Image (cartoon, rainbow, N blue to C red):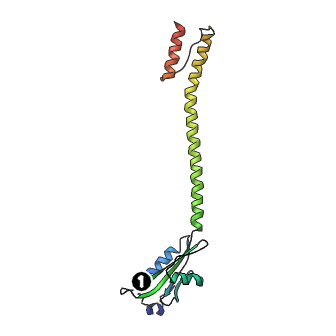
Amino acid sequence: LEFTAHSVEVGLTNDLFDYIKKTIDRVANYSIFEGFILFDEDMTPIMVKPKGFELPTEVVQKLIKGEKVVIGDIHYEAKVIRDEDGEVLGNTAIACTKKPLRVEARQAFYYAVVVGLVFTLFALSIITWLITKMIKPLGEVVRVVQKIAQGDLSETVTVDSADEIGELASATTTMVRK
């Protein structure tokens, strides 16, 4: 990527050329980047990144018409560069792929599923613990009431709970004592 006499001929200033170069150097680090070409007004390449990157002829023809082009996973797009007077200085064409995005989206989906399953299992274990904590004392009350129904008044309920089940256990023990 060099600033050449040809780029001066098409009207690109040092600043504009440097801006384009720096931008493309930054964009080239992204996984979706496939390639970039800066053309003069006659569609002659001035700058190519990476070296050897070429656009298929049918893509160039469609890009000249202003069409976006998609071939497989590769998306091509072009923009016209104009000077302050609206004169065409050249064109830019960039090619990007969505393949890495699909891979990242798939990984994010799997991660979300795993995290969701972990939280679901955690919630189920807490619910199971809470239900067991509530049902066990109730089972003790039922056991003592069944003994009372059989005539055994020696049983007492030992439930240490301040909720309604604790009150039921206390009332059952009081009933047996009277």
Name the spot of residue 122 as percent of width and height, x first: 57, 41
Residue 73 versus residue 157: which sits nearer the camera?
73
Q: Secondary structure at mark 1?
A: helix
Residue, disc 1? 16
User: Looking at the image, which residue is at 53% across and 14% down?
Assistant: 172
Answer with left or right where residue 158 lies relative to residue 150: left
Image quadrant of residue 59? bottom right
Compared to residue 110, the image places residue 67 above or below, namely below
Name the spot of residue 123 as percent of width and height, x first: 55, 40
Name the spot of residue 93 as percent of width and height, x first: 51, 80
Q: Is residue 54 visible?
A: no
User: Looking at the image, which residue is at 57% across and 33% down?
Assistant: 129
User: Looking at the image, which residue is at 60% across and 55% down?
Assistant: 110
Compared to residue 66, the image places residue 171 above or below, namely above
Q: Quick one: which residue is furthest to the right in this view? A: 150
Q: Is residue 69 visible?
A: yes
Compared to residue 45, the image places residue 35 above or below, namely above
Amino acid at circle 1: Leu
Compared to residue 19, the image places residue 87 above or below, namely below
Answer with left or right where residue 83 lies relative to residue 6: left
Q: Quick one: which residue is furthest to the left in this view? A: 85
